[in-house]
Image (cartoon, rainbow, N blue to C red):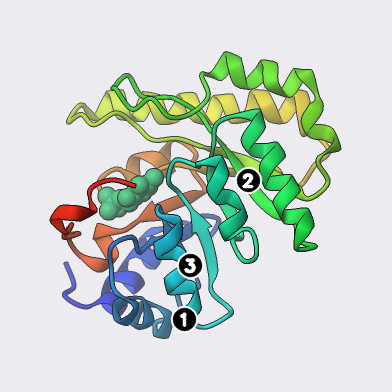
Amino acid sequence: MDTNIAGRLSALRESLPDNVTLVAVSKTHSVELIKEAYNAGQRIFAENKVQEMIMKHGQLPEDIQWQFIGHVQRNKIRLMAPFVSLIQGIDSFSSLVETDRQAGRFGRKIGCLLQIHISSGDNKHGFVPDECISMLRDGGWRSLENISIRGVMGMASLTADKSQIFEEFQALTSFFHTVKDEFFRNNSDFGTISAGMSDDYGLAVKAGSNMVRIGTGIFGKRIYAPTDKKG
Ligand SMILES: *Cc1c(COP(=O)(O)O)cnc(C)c1O
């Protein structure tokens, strides 16, 4: 593996098909390291803590697209609403409503991905697929004009079993198509399948992902401060 960020980024870009968007997961990493990736041409970065994203947004170039990939706490949506481009972890109708309300206050339109629970593990976040379908059938989302539902996001189980991981990613792709057919057939905004991280993005792409979220594979290992574990 290349030892510098620019080298890792270019190797990653070469390994990914053209239709796959590379999201650089910069959580815990310094503004300096993000600048290195920026100078190597990367423009999409993702964070999982609102305060950290706000701090970095304030210190880095304006043309960065910031995405939020953590669990979405409704009371924090207003803090990121002025600039966030995509919220990946939407797992309730009320989060969609709040994102719409806050985007409206700033005259913006915010992209949202519906997080779907595809893993067998204890990661409790995300819609159960059937819940997501009922939410969409209820139809309330159709009147939310300040958001754009752009697709789905999922995380595979933490397991060494590659065939299980692959099947979970395939389930996400197939869920995406089911939802696309029933609700978003004529909506070209709904086109994203966000799946795959440093260790499993190859499997995800093979299973149909067109957005990978890579942290370690770009920036190296994350070091968490002892007080930093939560929130
Ligand atoms: C941290 C994180 C990633 C990136 O993980 P790596 O293994 O470092 O690539 C991707 N997606 C989500 C939701 C994350 O929280």
Q: Identity of the amino acid at label 2? A: Cys
- The residue lying at 35 percent from left, 30 percent from top is 166
Q: Which type of secondary structure does the marked residue at label 3 adopt? A: helix
Instruction: Report whether 20 appears left or right of 24.
Output: right
Residue 198 in sight in this render: no
Residue 30 image position (x, y, % from top left): 29, 74
In the displayed structure, would residue 80 be above or below residue 229? below
Instruction: Report whether 116 appears left or right of 143.
Output: left
Q: Earlier in the sequence, mark 3 or mark 2?
A: 3
Residue 155 image position (x, y, % from top left): 38, 35
Q: Respond yes or no on whether mark 3 lies under 8 Å from ligand 1.
A: no
* Residue picked out by circle 1: 60
Dot 3 surroundings within 10 Å: few (below 14), some, or many (20 or more)? some
Q: Identity of the amino acid at label 1? A: Leu
Label ID, residue 112: 2
Dot 2 surroundings within 10 Å: few (below 14), some, or many (20 or more)? many
Q: Nearer the viewer, mark 3 or mark 1?
A: 3
Dot 1 surroundings within 10 Å: few (below 14), some, or many (20 or more)? some
* Residue picked out by circle 3: 54
Residue 70 image position (x, y, % from top left): 42, 46
Asked if marks 3 and 2 touch (Cβ < 8 Å), the reply is no
Instruction: Report whether 125 appears left or right of 3.
Output: right
